[in-house]
Amino acid sequence: MRIATAILIFVLVSCKNDVKSKDDLVKLKTEVQQNELEIYDYEGLKPYLNTSSEKTYVVNFWATWCAPCVKELPYFEQLNTDYSDKNVEVILVSLDFPKKYETTLKPYIKDKKIKSKVIALNDTDSNSWIPQISEEWSGAIPATLIYNKDKRQFYERTFTYDELETEVKQFLN
């Protein structure tokens, strides 16, 4: 019996460094979630492009290699923060190349502390999905879709914060 107790104490003591506190586990879970990137083809993205709820969605198509996209991205982040209590959600759809997800996209999201939902669209058949998002879309980015259950508007252009806010306010009235 003494030997079994000694072994049990030894095992518990030697394993104590592997046991994380609750705070450490929450921090680790958050880090894992932040490093997880949702990747969809167009079929997987479709549910993010229509709603029957009262929420207004601002869906921005962008890429880390697109200078105008990167320049306006803070405005979308600010809008997401400023309007989260007004039933508005920003979704950032990255058109970065799949081979750049780990080396460029994920580090960019982490470095810029992006809080908006980021989805990577991995669908090479752009000739079929671009016109489904908007018949007017040439495929150039940045491009933004703002919609709710009653209204839908597509913009193939860049925004300042004030311009973006003005457009979103039209959906909230």
Image (cartoon, helix red, strand yellow):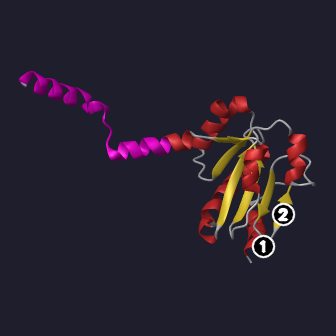
* Residue at 61% in and 65% down: 84
Image x and y of residue 10, in percent: 17, 25
Q: Are marks 1 and 2 in contact (CB under 8 Å)?
A: yes
- The amino acid type, in three-letter code, at marker 1 is Gln
* Most common SS among magenta residues: helix
Image x and y of residue 112, in percent: 60, 45
In terms of sequence position, does the residue under pointer 1 or pointer 2 come before the other? 2
Q: Quadrant of the C terminus?
A: bottom right
Kind of element beneath mark 1: helix
Kind of element beneath mark 2: strand
Which residue in the protein does label 2 denote?
A: 153
Q: Quadrant of the N terminus?
A: top left
Image x and y of residue 95, in percent: 76, 41
- Identify the magenta region: 2-31
Which residue in the protein does label 1 denote?
A: 170
Report how far apart the C-alphas of labels 1 and 2 lie in the structure: 10 Å
